[in-house]
């Protein structure tokens, strides 16, 4: 069963999982230059201060995040 998929136009930061534009050279969230082109699971966080998901993932900036990187 194939579980990997590639979303068009976004790549995930390997350090914070923030989803950046394909054209980005460094992560908008943490400045890392290491990206995963293939990732799975998408969460969108608006209110990071009150989100338990954000806290459990150590997310500080609102945005779109991948759950799993390959
Ligand atoms: Zn990052």
Image: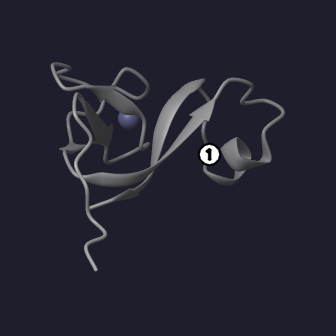
Residue 35 in percent (x, y) is at 22, 42
According to the image, label 1 marks what residue?
Answer: 58
Q: Residue furthest front?
A: 1
Q: Nearer the viewer, residue 19 or 13?
A: 19
Along the horizontal axis of the image, is 1 left or right of 64? left
In this rendering, the answer to whether 1 lies above or below 69 is below
Q: Neighbour class for label 1 at 10 Å: few (<14), some, many (≥20)?
A: few
User: Residue 2 appears in which quarter of the rendering?
Assistant: bottom left
Q: Left of 2 or right of it: where is 65?
A: right
Give the left or right position of residue 64, taking residue 7 as reference.
right
Residue at (79% x, 47% y) in the render: 52
Picture coordinates of residue 48, whole percent (x, y): 72, 30
Find out if the beta carbon at label 1 lies less than 8 Å from the nearest ligand 1 atom.
no
11 w.r.t. 40: above or below: above
In the figure, residue 12 lies in which quadrant?
top left
x 31%, y 69%: residue: 3
Mark 1 secondary-structure assignment: loop
Q: Quadrant of the C terminus?
A: bottom left
Q: Quadrant of ligand 1?
A: top left
**Quadrant in which the N terminus is drawn:** bottom left
Residue 33 drawn at (x, y percent): 20, 33
Q: Residue at x 74, y 25 (%)?
A: 47
Spot occupied by residue 23 in the image (x, y as percentages of width and height): 15, 19
Residue 51 picture quarter: top right
Residue at 58 percent across and 33 percent down: it is 44
Total marks shown come to: 1
> From this viewpoint, which residue is outermost toward the right?
50
């Amino acid at each position: 069963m194939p579980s990997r998929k590639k979303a068009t136009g976004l790549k995930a930061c390997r350090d914070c999982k923030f989803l950046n534009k394909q054209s980005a050279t460094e992560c908008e969230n943490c400045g890392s230059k290491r990206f995963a082109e293939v990732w799975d699971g998408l969460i969108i966080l608006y209110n990071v201060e009150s989100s338990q998901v954000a806290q459990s993932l150590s997310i500080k900036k609102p945005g779109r995040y991948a759950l799993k990187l390959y």
